[in-house]
Every structure is written in structure tokens, then in C-alpha cells.
Image: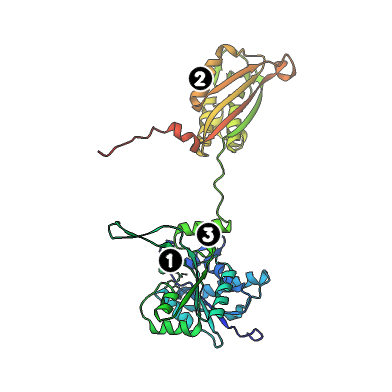
Amino acid sequence: MTDCPTPVVAVIVVAAGSGTRLGRSHPKAFVHLGGSTLLEHALRAVFALSEPVQVIVVAPEDRVSEARAIAADAAAASAALGHAAPAETVEVVAGGATRQESVRYGLAVLRDGVEIVLVHDAARALTPPALFERVVGAVRDTGVGVIPGLPVVDTIKRVDVSGGILGTVDRSELSAVQTPQGFPRNLLVAAHDSLADEATDDAALVAAAGHRVHVVTGDARAFKITTPHDLERAELVLGVRNPAPAVVLPRVGTGLDVHAFDDESELWLAGLFWPGERGLSGHSDGDVAVHAVCDALLGAAGLGDVGGVFGTSDSRFAGAHGDVFLEETLRLVTAAGFGVGNVSLQIIGNRPRFAPRRAEAEALLASILRAPVNIAATTTDALGFTGRGEGIAASATALLVPLVLAAPSLAEPPVLSLDV
Ligand code: CTP
Ligand code: MG
């Protein structure tokens, strides 16, 4: 870079941890949150700062080039938002076995001219730029180390190894600290150079080296993503959490069928054989009532219609009776995740007189579909093709119930066992 002013502030974003507690197959900073990695989220805030900063990303050794690409994406995203992202000032270095070691590798590439160093966890991916600005401003004002912290809201107990309470800690003295933690460069570098003992944050090292560190007000959005629950929280904060699964509603379908009388055929209607009655034409047995029911069931399940499912070219259904169609339809809707709630069927025609065998037909269809079936029959007052005795029509409505809703009534009652 040539025409950018030399940065006085550097931000080291440590992203070299493995994320054991998050339990993903890849390192935590490379886990996605709403379409971008945690590292990219963290870097976007850094690139949104009002002054040019040297950005140092500390990545796992085998992900240095990936981190470089992520940094470029974050810089581009910030530039698109109107921030003058100084992408040329990004360095990516390989991290170490501990966080402290990773910070040290980041410190090693600080540029000349940098006077204030912020160390930030990539895992605090939603930290707003304002918190960085607040820390930088406070380091400038005070000349000492500054870290963000929030009051502890829970009551804190000291406990022994068996869980016995030893006492209640005065929480007014406590602060839950976050990152970015900012320090005058020389203090931080010296603290890292002089102390070998591992510390979980940089403030502890600087304080152990005998320097005062101030806490400024932190930000709830700077929480550290450590566990799967934290990642869910981050998704909620960003508004990218998948909406709750849609309520599974019952489904309704309708079916209509018409067949002309055919004196050469026997009559099969609503699954029953009707001796002595005029038959109906059709590829199968011409049972309009059953075909209407099948259409209603298939339609409710979104599986098309009888013609599409039971093609006339399929020899299994040539001359087949209603039970074959209904059983196959039931198999299909069950496979699609539904049970039959109920079926309502209307038969329209002058003949046969349906009432005497209505209960028989209802019982047959209900036993096949394992659901209540009601059958009504009507004439059309001598109107239309049915009124003229040219054929029979049938119309059906079916209600399907998603099996997840139907399951409790199908399941055995739970068996309770008591340990005595
Ligand atoms: N970190 C690092 N190098 C390490 C260990 C941690 O750069 N050797 C970074 C992490 O990438 C993270 C920050 O330090 O951004 C805070 O650490 P933590 O939340 O503990 O992350 P991990 O160590 O990755 O997670 P875990 O402890 O669950 O394995
Ligand atoms: Mg860790």
C-alpha cells in the first residue's frame, strides 16, 4: 500500500483455535454463521473502523490461505458498505498450540509505527465496531491496557470439589471480560516476552507483568461463541436462525369420476359387485366411486391423480377391482407421510338403488382405508347425463392427517417403570 497513512493501531484477530467445545469437524473461526464464517463476521467489524488499522489474522497452520481469502471477502463486504477497508494491510500468520502462543505470533509481524495493539477473539464474531473504537479511545486517553467487561448478573458461589458451597462471591467486584483488549504496544510485547505461564487473556499477562489494566463497558454482542448453544444465540441475534418448522397441517383433496353405462360389463360400485345391474365402461372395473376416492386421496397427498398413478398401460390394474386401487393408493399416501382422516363420497345416478347396501359399502371401504367413510347417493331429478340414465358420477372428499400428528393415537400408551 502506498497512499494510506501508516496505521498507528493494529488489531490481532486470533482464529487459530480448534473449537473443541463447539464440536464441529472444522476449526471454530471457519464455522458458518448465516452464510459467512465467524472469522469473516469478526473482520467486517474491524474493517469498519474509522481509522486505518493493521489487521493481523492468526489462523490454523493449514488454513492460512483460506483465512486470506476470507479477509479479502470481509474487506470487499466492508467496502461495499462504504467503509474504506484497508485490505492491503492484512497479514495472515499461522497460530500456535495455545491462544497465548497465537497472540505472540501475531505480535511478531507488527509494523513499524503501530503504537496501540488490540487483541480480539474471532470467536466473538458479532462484536460491534463501536466496542473497538471505545477500547482504542480509552487506551489513547489512559496510556494503559483497556479491556471491555460487563457486570456479572448471576449470583456466584465458591464451591468445593464435592459441590458444597464455601461462600457467595461479592459480584459487585466482578466483571465478565471480553475482547478486543487494547494495550500500548510496548507493554503487551514486553508482557508476552517475559511471561511463559499460560493465561486465558492478554490482560492477565499485562497485569502479571505489574501494569494496571482498566475495564470499560463491554457489549452484549461481544459474547464468545464457545458452545453450540452460543452459535444458536448468534444466529438469533443475526436473525438468520431457521424459522421453526411450519405447523404440519392436515391436507384435503377432492376427486370426481364419471363412467358411461356399458351393457357388456358387470357393475362394480363402491367396491361391491352389483349382480343384475348395468355395468360401467372403463379400463378397470369402472368403479367410479372408488376412482373418485383415490383421486381425493392422491390429491390431498399431492401425488397427482388416478390416471397418472394407475396408467392404463399397467396390466396389474386391467380389470382390477376397487380394493386393489384403494390399497395401492393407501400405500402411496402412507409412504408420503399421511394417514387417512376420513372420506366423504357422493354417488350420483339413477341406478343402482344404493341405500340398501350403503352400510356394507361404507364398512368395506373403511376397512381398507382404516378410516371412517361416509357414502351418500343422489339422483339429479332426471337432469343431465345421469338423469337421462347414461352413466354414474361420483365425487369424493378426503382428509389426510400427517403421520406425526396421527402417531400418538396409533402408538401404544407409554409404559412407566419405577426404580424401587
Ligand atoms: N485461539 C487461537 N489459538 C489457539 C487457541 C485459541 O488463536 N491455539 C483463538 C480461538 O480461535 C478463538 C480465541 O482464541 O478465537 C478464543 O479461544 P476459544 O474460545 O477457547 O477457542 P478455541 O480454543 O478454538 O475453542 P475450544 O477451547 O473450545 O477448543
Ligand atoms: Mg480454547
Secondary structure type for disc 3: helix
Q: Position of residue 391 (x, y in %)?
A: 68, 19
Could you say which quadrant of the image residue 383 lies in? top right
Q: Residue furthest left?
A: 420
Q: Position of residue 272 (x, y in %)?
A: 54, 19
Q: Residue furthest bottom?
A: 112
Q: Closer to the camera, 58 or 405?
A: 58
According to the image, label 2 marks what residue? 363
Q: Closer to the camera, 30 or 335?
A: 30
Query: Upstream in the sequence, badge 3 or badge 2?
Result: 3
Q: Amino acid at mark 2?
A: Ala
User: What's the distance in space between the residues labelled 3 and 1, CA to CA?
Assistant: 28 Å
According to the image, label 1 marks what residue? 173
Mark 2 residue's CB less than 8 Å from ligand 1: no
Q: Closer to the camera, 56 or 71?
A: 56
Query: Upstream in the sequence, badge 2 or badge 1?
Result: 1
**How many residues crowd mark 3 within 10 Å: few (<14), some (14–19), many (20+)?**
many
Could you say which quadrant of the image residue 409 lies in? top left
According to the image, label 3 marks what residue? 234
Q: Is residue 164 above or below residue 186?
A: above
Q: Is residue 76 above or below residue 371?
A: below
Secondary structure type for disc 1: helix
Q: Amino acid at mark 1?
A: Glu
